[in-house]
Image: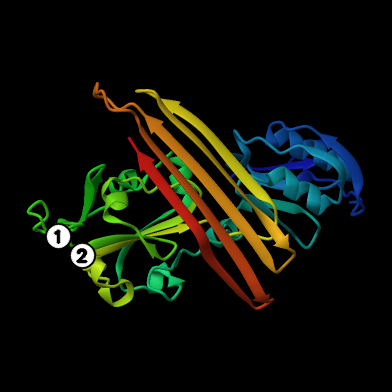
Amino acid sequence: MRLRVNAALGVLLIAALPAMAQSSDSKTLSIPAQDLDAALLALGQAFGMNVVAAEDLTVGLTSSALQGDFTPDAALKQLLSGTELVFEVSSNGTFIIQRASVSQRLSAIPDRKIEEIVIRGEKIDRPLLNTLSSVSVLEGEVIDNSYITDLSQIFQRITNVSGSGSGFAIRGIPERGVGSGTGDTSQTSAVYVDGAVQSQFSSSGGIVSTWDISQVEVFRGAQTTTQGRAALGGAVIVNTEDPGFEWSGRARIAGGEYDTRQYAAALGGPIIDETLAFRIAVDSNETDGFNDSSLPMVRCLMISVARSVTWSEASCCCEPAIRLKRCSR
């Protein structure tokens, strides 16, 4: 293995290195990003320091730029950042560059805390990893990024769940039961928005809007113990955004084929600081559909108002106050 030494006099063999006084004081440096070999040479000339590296370690690598005041240790660490190379200082003051070990590379990765997903549909909030139910969760960010506008589109993305504008089924069981279509209108799967069960027309028509939604939970299997007799086949839990004590708002204007139009807005903020807050969301969808008909277009309007009351710093109560929905032809 050949070794190269970058010193104040240039590239020398380590055995021929002259005695030099190395400075440990900080200096103002201006070394641009360049080949790592050239950057190490410039650093050695600036501090009068000896840097030793195996030839195959630095080939093809580019250094980071140095601008500002640095000590030798800090400057060399900056130059090597992003190269998976580290250094150690020998007893005679020589900086020896070597490849980082696995543990060193892992320790250089910044800690990233994975946000915990909390399930609310079991009446007791608990982490997703701790629930025994078969449940799929879509968070509001995913819904917005995928431009999902109603529940029927969510049903198409979840395993063991199928749905369209005419209804949905969980594990093959239609929401109105196996005997649906024979006059039996009893529900076997229900949709709950902020704890309020929705009518069969709302859930079957897929008109429950996903605008300003924080999370959707789809439970597969009987949920009658926690949700009631309408959830024998499963339950769909929709949680809207909670009010907060800081002003926030958002809006959306969208259009598509068949003269489809969407106008949506949401606004929330404090009424009484740290005591009472509100959030209101409005979503209007209109479309002509893909069939020519003498009937007027379908119009859906949803208005939801939520309030948040904090009784103490340690407890918070959030509940829907008003939820209006109107659809017409």
Q: Residue at x 10, y 51 (%)?
A: 181
Q: Residue at x 91, y 50 (%)?
A: 26
From the viewer's side, name the closer residue of 303 and 142. 303
Check if mark 2's residue and mark 1's residue have beta carbons within 8 Å: yes
The amino acid pointed to by label 2 is Gly
Residue furthest top in the image: 292
Q: Nearer the viewer, mark 2 or mark 1?
A: 1
Q: Quadrant of the N terminus?
A: top right
Q: Which residue is mark 2?
A: 233
Residue 214 seen in this snapshot: yes
Q: Quadrant of the C terminus?
A: top left
> Which type of secondary structure does the marked residue at label 1 adopt?
loop
Residue 209 seen in this snapshot: no
Q: Residue at x 52, y 66 (%)?
A: 319
| Dot 2 or dot 1, earlier in sequence | 1
Q: Which residue is mark 1?
A: 177
How many other residues sit within 10 Å of disc 1, few (<14), some (14-19) or many (≥20)?
some
Give the left or right position of residue 81, taking residue 232 as reference. Answer: right
How many other residues sit within 10 Å of disc 2, few (<14), some (14-19) or many (≥20)?
many
Q: Position of residue 184 (x, y in %)?
A: 12, 59
